[in-house]
Image: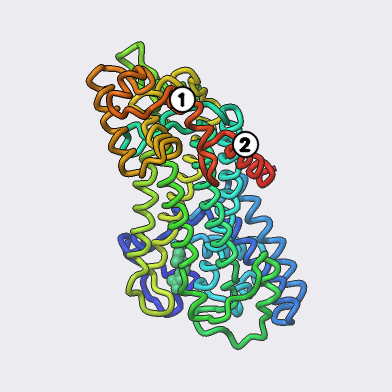
Amino acid sequence: TSNQMWGGRFAAGPDAIMEAINASIGFDKRMAAQDIAGSKAHAAMLAATGIVTDSDAKAMTEGLDAVLAEIEAGDFAFSAALEDIHMNVEARLKEIVGEPAGRLHTGRSRNDQVATDFRLWTRDQLDACETALEALMRALVAQAEAGADWVMPGFTHLQVAQPVTWGHHMLAYVEMFARDLSRVRDARARMNECPLGAAALAGTSFPIDRDMTAQALGFDRPAANSLDAVSDRDFALEFLGMASICAMHLSRMAEELVIWSSAQFRFVALSDRFSTGSSIMPQKKNPDAAELIRAKIGRIFGANVALTLVMKGLPLAYSKDMQEDKEQVFDAADNLMLALAAMEGMVRDMSANREVLEAAAATGFSTATDLADWLVRVLNMPFRDAHHVTGSLVALAEKKGCDLPDLSLEDMQGVHAAITGDVFGVLGVHNSVASRVSYGGTAPDNVRAQLARWQEILK
Ligand code: ARG
């Protein structure tokens, strides 16, 4: 039998393979609530403009509520023969309310319907991302507050570079996630135009009121060009672009947690709640959540690439290719939300090892720059000369197998006669971080000022 929605000109039904490649109900049933909200807004508008009677609209609305209740209760029989969520809902509506159901699709097409549903779904995800990012930022701020002035090694090339503060390192991630958050908000503001009423591609001859449906669905305005409205998937790509960058940030942080929780570093201890054991090695406590977060960028960026390539070269307006948009966004959204929640939990639970951090901060000649700066400041040496003298002192310490503060004054004066005992004042890691008072620097006072700023923003 031919399709009851569009089978008028068909003598035969689709081949089983045709149905298999065509049906999207297996995944787009996730947009049921959005589809029904869109249909209810459309029904109310059809009545308000006199396109259908009030009693027909009432039947549609009540019927749509009944369909949603069935879906939410889990006793809706989804049918692949009905292809997608849009036709599944409409077919069931017909069974429940009869003839008025057939008037619902007046002045509308599945093309503007799916564009509307998918926008609503993606918008909900952006809102959920906003909440999750704020929660993660709060967890990082709490860590920064607990250890605003704890010293740790700062790295470049993963080699010890200069001491920094734990609070400063935590707030570096807050900055990154704050930019992700601003990308979420930008994307939401830009995508918030309603495609409904664009119909198949050209608009409609019915006297529809697009402002009314746009407003009912929480959009800022109707999309201005019907061809664009049904063809545009930028909003999905922006979601995936945002998600890719955010997942990249999560991956970098996850990598640090993997390194920091190792026996060689012991900078942090992850909680039992966010660790796993080994089935053979009884002593093991593994950072699996961090590793999985580190990996999520793979599928999320993959989704971004996949949808970009699906959209590339598509002529206007709708093509069925675009049905391939949803699974990518669904999967990326699910995994981004999971990664954000897991990172928040891990950060909230983890305990930084203050003593280990401080001891590590002093290794690797980490205050060599402070020594060079002292030579410039006190002995008025040009920085390049100071760099050279300090390099000789580092080489001497290395030869003696000690750190810079362990050299004697005689050792130092052997390299440069004018050095005085005052120099030892700058070689300690606490003095080092306390001196980094330039705006944005790692000094505890700066960190506390930034903390206050974030606490105000996030309260
Ligand atoms: N399931 C389709 C999709 O996800 C809905 C739109 C179908 N439109 C059409 N003209 N066949 O894109």
What residue is shown with label 1? 422
Q: Amino acid at mark 2?
A: Arg
Q: Nearer the viewer, residue 170 or 365?
A: 365
Q: Nearer the viewer, residue 442 or 411?
A: 411
Q: Give residue 448's mark.
A: 2
User: How many marks on residues?
Assistant: 2
Quadrant in which the N terminus is drawn: bottom left
Precedes in sequence: disc 1 or disc 2: 1
From the top left corner, tell me how far across and down residue 344 is, in percent.
Answer: 54, 35
Report helix, strand or loop for mark 1: helix
From the top left corner, tell me how far across and down residue 206 is, in percent.
Answer: 63, 85
Q: Residue at x 50, y 35 (%)?
A: 342
| Residue found at the very far left of the displayed protein | 399
Task: Give the quarter the ligand 1 occupies.
Answer: bottom left
| Residue found at the very far front of the displayed protein | 418
Q: Residue at x 54, y 62 (%)?
A: 187
Distance between the alpha carbons at the discs numbered 1 and 2 = 28 Å
**Is 48 situated above or below 61?**
below
Q: Nearer the viewer, residue 120 or 292?
A: 292
Q: Amino acid at mark 1?
A: Asp
Q: Nearer the viewer, residue 139 or 388?
A: 388
Tell me if I can see residue 292 in this picture: no
Which of labels 1 and 2 is toward the front?
1
**Is 410 situated above or below 318?**
above
Q: Residue at x 55, y 49 (%)?
A: 178
- Which class describes the residues within 10 Å of circle 2: few (<14), some (14-19), or many (20+)? some
